[in-house]
Image: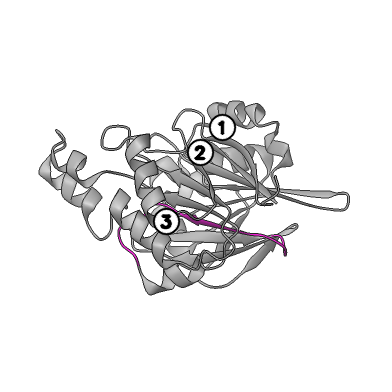
Amino acid sequence: MKFASLGSGSEGNSLLMAASSGTTHTHVMLDCGFGMREAERRLALLGLSPTQLNGIVVTHEHSDHIGGVFKLARRHHIPVWLTHGTFEAAAADEAAGVDIRLCRDGEAFAIGDLELRPYTVPHDAREPVQYTATDGYYKLGVLTDVGQSTSHLIAALGACDALVLEFNHDSEMLAQSAYPAWLKGRIAGPLGHLSNAHAAQILAAIDRSRLRKLVGAHLSQKNNTRELARDAIASALQGQAVDVVVAEQESGFGWISCDAQE
């Protein structure tokens, strides 16, 4: 099992997950906040065509996550999984002609060789979820676009071999930024995005007994730095041997295997 990113940040997000079993190959896209042509271009950089996608799963309706989903799915006949609330919040005409599959918190579903399990998170959207994925051997956890920790998400992310975790902003940089007060409040609020400190607290709290790969994701380009995010990650890991990558808005990150040996 492996995963990669087309891009991560407020200008667009998309994650790829892949698994193989014998002669079959499964590729699942999580979110697509890029226009169709840009998504196709970024997929090509990772060696994939949209026709190889077996499904798209959606976390919530904000445009940097869902903006390109329906056009890409319609053009290439890709089924889309999302919650009822997210579907209701999305424009009905956008989803016309798309094979829509509804999912909900805690109920696993299979796409090829991958099993996906959505879990509810606190964010300012209609029915937001994040996902864990497994091929039966390895477990990948994804947590971005969340304002605070909950016991539910801590449990959901336990015993992951690999984790994509939001380190959105440095609290001091955000407080001193030129953003208007309402936007600062929204980002730092309980339905907003994780600060470096809050993300580190989540990382420290989860069961990390199997964790070998960690990606810091959804960094603010104005209110965070890669160095600050890495410092927060190091403080939470406390010397644990984990391969750490920080995702980029422009290029995401290349394929990462969940296998600790690779």
Q: CA distance from mark 3 to mark 1?
A: 37 Å
Is 45 placed above or below 130 here?
above
Question: How many discs appear?
Answer: 3
Badge 2 marks a residue whose secondary structure is loop
- Magenta: main secondary structure equals loop
Is the Cβ of the residue at disc 3 closer than 8 Å to that at disc 1?
Answer: no
Task: Judge from the rendering whether residue 237 lies leftward or rightward of residue 209; answer left or right.
Answer: left
Magenta residues (range): 135-149
- Please determine whether, in this image, residue 72 is positioned above or below residue 203: above
Q: Is residue 29 above or below residue 6?
A: below
Dot in front, 2 or 1: 1
Q: Which residue is mark 2?
A: 68
Q: Position of residue 134 (x, y in %)?
A: 66, 61
User: Which secondary structure lies at badge 1?
Assistant: helix
* Left or right: 144, with 70 as reference point: left
Q: Is residue 216 magenta?
A: no
Q: Residues within 10 Å of mark 1 (few under 14, many from 20)?
A: many
Pinpoint residue 120: horizontal percent, then vertical percent.
43, 67
Locate residue 159, reporting x and y percent. Answer: 56, 67
Q: Is residue 137 magenta?
A: yes
Q: Which residue is mark 3?
A: 238
Asked if residue 130 lies left or right of residue 78, the reply is left
Residue type beneath disc 3: Gln
